[in-house]
Every structure is written in C-alpha cells, then in structure tokens.
Image (cartoon, rainbow, N blue to C red):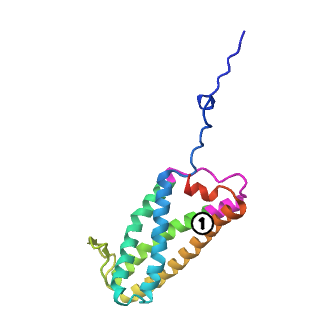
Amino acid sequence: MSTIIETPRAQIGSAPVRPAPAYTMTARVLHWITAVAILLMLPLGWASANEWGGAWQDWLYDLHRSIGAALIPLVLVRVIYRITHPPLPLPDAIAPLQRLAAAGTHWALYALLLAQPIIGWIATSAYPAPIPVFGLFELPPLSSANRALSDRLFALHAGCGIAIAGIVALHVGAACHHHFVRKDRVLLRMLTG
C-alpha cells in the first residue's frame, strides 16, 4: 500500500507564498491620508490661533476649517474599517505591555481625531463664524452664538491639538524605534503591508 503525500501547489517549483499583509492597502492609504492631514493641521492651527498669517490669515483659517471638516468622515471611515478589518497582531517578540500601549495610543488618537474637529465646529459656530469647506459649501452651525462658550471650546480645541501632537510624536518615535533600533517589521507593516 502506498501513501500519497500532497504538497501544496504554491511550494512546487515556485516562490514561497507571500504572507497576508498586516494592514490592507485600504488601511494603509487611510492611515497616510490621515497622517498628511494631521501634519498640515497642526501648523495651520498654530499659525491661525496666533494670527501669524498676515494677509493670508483668512485663507489659513478657511484651509484649517476645511481640512478639519474633511477629517470627520475620514476618521469615521477609518475607525469603521479598523473595527471590521483588524490588522494582524503585532509580532510575538513585542511585550504585552508594549502591545497594550500601542493599542491605547491608536484608540486615543482615533478618539481625539474625531473629537477635535467636532469641538472646533461647535466653537466656530458659537463664535459665530462660517465654516467653509474648500469653498464648495458651508457646514451648518452646531451652536447658537455664545462667545463665552466659544472661548472655552477653543481652549479645549487647542488642548486636544497639543494632545494629538504628543501622541503623534510618541507614535512616530515608537515606529522609528522599531525600525532603526529593534530592526523589526513594525514600521514596514504600514509601509508595505
């Protein structure tokens, strides 16, 4: 009696099968669009709040508001996609506490990226000022005029911006640590899958 051993086709005379990516192409595209938006928003917000724009001040405000308005649906799509398409787990070599820190950082960033533009929208409505979106339309106000409320919300908006900047710095620092010090694939997961 002979035994037939089947070998998977992918291993017969061909290159090894590439493992599934840690993040899908959609997840990576959403990540990098969000990253570019954040990297634009932080200096735009800082320059706008300090009125460093000179003749460009109104344009800076409008651009800041437009990108902020675009971030709301972008981050919502990103969170829904993340929940419905979770990435592969981090490598086993990463300690449980670091895994927890990574997850906490991601979800804190998602929460702040959703809260931040909504707080700005309410604060601008209470100021009251219009919220143009790339010159195409204006968002409806979410509050009646109330300058005191606007001032408090803009202070909260600034605090959220600082928190986002801090978390992004930690996120980038951790990615660089993994790539340049640990020399693992954690950063490459978001670059190439």
Up-down relation of residue 72 to residue 59 (above or below): above
Question: Mark 1 = which residue?
Answer: 105
Q: Is residue 89 magenta?
A: yes
Could you say where residue 103 lies in the image, as x and y percent from the top left?
Answer: 61, 61
Q: Which secondary structure lies at badge 1?
A: helix
Image location of residue 61, percent across then percent down: 37, 81
Depicted 183 relative to depicted 141: above or below: above
Q: Is residue 90 magenta?
A: yes
Q: In this picture, is 113 found above or below 126?
A: above
Question: Would you identify the image quadrant in which residue 142 lies?
Answer: bottom left
Write down the quadrant of residue 2 in the picture: top right
Nearer to us in this view, 158 or 23: 23
Q: Quadrant of the N terminus?
A: top right
Q: Residue at x 33, y 84 (%)?
A: 58
Residue that extends furthest to the top in the rendered view of this protein:
1
- Residue drawn at x 49%, y 82% as measured from the top left: 158
Q: Position of residue 171 (x, y in %)?
A: 60, 67
Labels in figure, total: 1
Taking the spot 62% from the left edge, 71% from the top edge, the residue there is: 170
The magenta segment is 83-102
Viewer-nearest residue: 176 or 123: 176
- Label 1 Cα crowd, 10 Å radius (few <14 / some 14-19 / many 20+): some
| Amino acid type shown at disc 1 | Thr
